[in-house]
Image: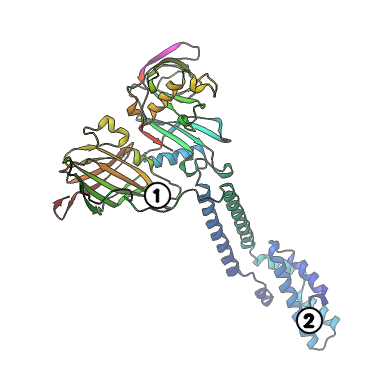
Amino acid sequence: MKKLFSRIKANPPKRGWRIAAALLLTAVLLFFTCTMAGWPALSPEHALRRAERRALIGMEGDVVFETGGMRYNMNATCTLAVRYGNRAAALFGVSQDGPLKLGWDRNSTGSAYYVFPQDQRGITVAAFTGYPRYMGFPEEAMFIGLFHDMEGADSAELSFTLTGEPFGTDFLCDYTLSSVDAGDGFFLFAFSSAATDEDFVESPDYHPIRDLAGRIDPWTYSQRGDDIAARVRFFDAAGNEIGGGETVFARALLQGG
Amino acid sequence: MLQQHPSFRRWAEQAAAHIRFPGDRPAVIRELTEHMEDRCDAFLAEGLSKAEAEKAALAAMGDADETGKALALIHRPFLGYLYKAAKIALLASAAMLLLVSCARGFDMPYSYGFSEPYSDLATESTATHVREITYLSPTAKAECGGYTFTLPSVMHRRFYDLVDGTSHRSLYFVLEAFHPSPAAFWPEGVRECIYAVDDLGNLYPNRCFSERYAEDEGREVCGNGTGRTLLRYRYEMWVSCVDPDAQWVELRYERLNCSFSLRIPLVKDGELL
């Protein structure tokens, strides 16, 4: 029996080496797969953390709001509102643009990340081109985010005036927007023209919207003139006004993506 | 030989049925059958008939189920399942690479490698312009946000316009960022927010903010990304309108809990460049 058993034996070293070789080759193939795919992030929040690291921000922000349900070029897109304590706030737009829809923000080119200083008065208003970049695709809506410390606020109203003289065309437009969505200490406003895509360039909103997009961009805002004043009003669930204040549109500290 | 004794094979299959990993059963069946063949040949050599030798060989093996259970106790199925899983993983990863490559059209996601720095800069003197070029090798190194920053190449240039008598001083440098993860990508915050100061207290703001902070028009820090490898990223950047008497320039980055600095001495062999 012992002799029988000694002959009937699996060959552990041979099989072990084969297992090790298969696993090593698998790891190599997966590495090349990820490289070809552009190392996409696994989720919008994972993409945000990468954007924070690329921007050399030494802290992780708290995601206070997340909206999805939008698509661009057949890719799902998502916008996150982020707070960095009481020092800064950010708006991050990211697209699920990995090959075969596997992952987000491949090659770090599928996102837009703007970081703004927080207003010490407790109300920070920041416009955001979203993803994709609004300036290149004027038919897309811009977002305006409102970070606040007002407890009990169920909705908000934002009023501002845009003026300018781009290319010799004067414009002075008053806007009053109502919040369309809310998060923890955050309200979202959508800012877009009522004109159709074909008529947008000729509409009276064209220059104001493009001007606002230019002002938030840290590479161009210095050429755009004074800060844009904004007035905010907060309302409770019953619709009663519970507070508000004056502020200015924040200018981005950082722009990534 | 195996076909001459189908009873051997049947016995071996009955015993091997107790082996938990099906992939190992053929090898066990083969070994048991060969062992019985050897025993049968030994009995034949002693003078038994073929039928008697076959019967004696089977009797010597004992009960098939008991033998099978004893074999199962010493057999380790784990390695067998692991090997099967490793083969499946290998095939799946190969298929995934093929699918992703097809989806990307077999294009690499980014260009790879570093180009020669300062290739677009004029460095030669002419009849009306004099350019004094000095290459420096600062040893400054800084870490921030998981990246390690170094200055592998710095070029100092003094430019004299012989026509109008003006002169300018500029620094051109390659800023390299290293990150141990290939998924880190470009540290974009650097290009937009890095600025510089010198020993005389002059500020060289990043071009993003130059209109707001620059006291001397033209003083700025700016640059572009110029290449990457798997773990390294390079920017070619410049500091323009450096003070003629500055002895060093320090690049600085400060944002939300993250800061670093890299100093570039502008003195060589005790003399101001």
* Left or right position of A58 against A66: left
* Left or right position of B182 against A87: right
Colouring method of the image = rainbow
**Residue that sits furthest to the top in the current view:** A240
Q: Name the quarter where the C terminus of chain A is drawn.
A: top left
Query: How many angstroms separate mark 2 from mark 1 (CA)?
Result: 74 Å
Residue A199 placement (x, y as % from top left): 53, 21
Residue at point 25%, 36% (across, down)? B218
Three-letter amino acid code of the residue under disc 2: Cys
Question: Which segment did they paint magenta?
Answer: A232-246
Q: Nearer the viewer, residue A51 or B122?
A: B122
To which chain does the residue with label 2 belong? B
Q: Nearer the viewer, residue A166 or A233?
A: A166
Residue B205 visible here: yes
* Left or right position of B4 against A193: right
To which chain does the residue with label 1 belong? B
Three-letter amino acid code of the residue under disc 1: Gly
Residue A182 placement (x, y as % from top left): 49, 23
Residue B269 placement (x, y as % from top left): 15, 56
Q: Secondary structure at mark 2?
A: helix
Magenta span main SS? strand
Q: Secondary structure at mark 1?
A: strand
Residue A191 visible here: no
Q: Nearer the viewer, residue B120 or B220?
A: B120
Vertical placement of residue A100 versus B26, above or below: above
- Count of numbered labels shown in the rendering: 2
* Magenta-drawn stretch contains A167: no
Residue B227: which numbered mark, if any?
1
Q: Disc 2 designates what residue?
A: B40
Q: Nearer the viewer, mark 2 or mark 1?
A: 1
Which of the 4 quarters of the picture holds residue A225? Answer: top left
